[in-house]
Amino acid sequence: MNFLSKLKDAGIFYRKANTYKDVENNDLADLIYRILEDKEHSCSFNNIEKVRKILLKDEKVLNIIDPGAGSNKIKDHLRTVKSIAKTSLSSKWQCELMSNIIKEFHCETILELGTSFGVSASYLANANRHGIVYTLEGSEPIATIAMQTFARLNIKNVRLLIGDFDVTLPTILDNMDDIDFAFIDGNHRYESTLKYFEMILEKSHSTTIIIIDDIYWSQGMKNAWNSIKNHPKVTATLDFYNFGIVFFNKKYAGNHTVINSKYKIL
């Protein structure tokens, strides 16, 4: 998508966006407040953010063969760690929000598609040290950096699988009874996103939370997000522009475009 299209999408999103105060479903409004705006509910992850800063300055060159849709900004197979970190790492506030969700719902079996350098997986793992984070990465050089991240942070409850998601995802799902939380952030194609969503759905239950990243990344991702919102098993969704949250619990019924109340001026 070009810059003007993205600017238009952002403008539409902002005009339609609700704050938690505008959500009529009280259960959902309370949840949005707790995961997004209640600072007492958030934890400090200073050590992870120190690693992020290191990655953003790392000049090491990696040879990347991306099995997914790749980057909208970087097309060369030879990339520096810092250039990948700049475009692929989930933001601090998104990581904190996902961490808050895991704490809120006491998620123990956590799945991530798209490890990158391990920053988001580190947040997910820290949110529940008694749970297990299964994270999948398609690129071996990137996965190697992620393993260094986990070692540096002394994170023991992450299981990293390297390879094409079409191979690794069925393998990991076959060994799972169910999934409490899933973060889909890899292979940004319409067909792949829907396929992975459906596969994860088979292991989901009424309180499972699925997060879809980069839902405005391309027209294909926008279409995938719309298809997921209209899935018969989905009871509610929250659109945070950079990512969307999917619920299956009927008490959260409704679809909302959400923004932090401090940013909603009009």
Image (tube, rainbow, N blue to C red):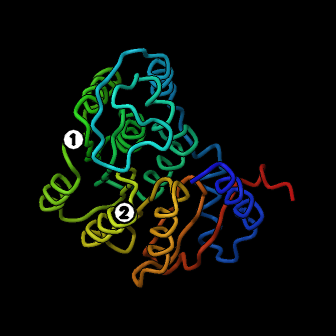
Q: Which residue is mark 1?
A: 159
Q: Of discs 2 and 1, which sits in the foreground?
A: 2
Q: Residue at x 80, y 55 (%)?
A: 264
Q: Secondary structure at mark 2?
A: helix
Q: Amino acid at mark 1?
A: Arg
Q: Position of residue 117 (x, y in %)?
A: 36, 32
**Vertical side of 138 occupied by 204: above or below:** below
In the rendered structure, find residue 106 and report the number of the disc placed on it: none
Q: Position of residue 59 (x, y in %)?
A: 42, 14
Q: Residue at x 54, y 45 (%)?
A: 94
Of residues 217 and 209, which is closer to you in this image? 217
Mark 1 packing: few (<14 Cα in 10 Å), some, or many (20+)?
A: few
Q: Is residue 27 left or right of residue 74?
A: right
Of residues 176 and 131, which is closer to you in this image? 176
Q: Position of residue 224 (x, y in %)?
A: 45, 68
Q: Is residue 206 left or right of residue 63?
A: right
Q: Earlier in the sequence, mark 2 or mark 1?
A: 1
Q: Residue at x 55, y 37 (%)?
A: 92
**Vertical side of 17 occupied by 160: above or below:** above
Residue 150's image quarter? top left
Residue 170's image quarter? bottom left
Q: Quadrant of the N terminus?
A: bottom right
Q: Which residue is mark 2?
A: 193
Q: Quadrant of the C terminus?
A: bottom right
Q: Position of residue 253 (x, y in %)?
A: 55, 79
Mark 2 packing: few (<14 Cα in 10 Å), some, or many (20+)?
A: many
Q: Amino acid at mark 2?
A: Thr
**Vertical side of 3 occupied by 233: above or below:** below
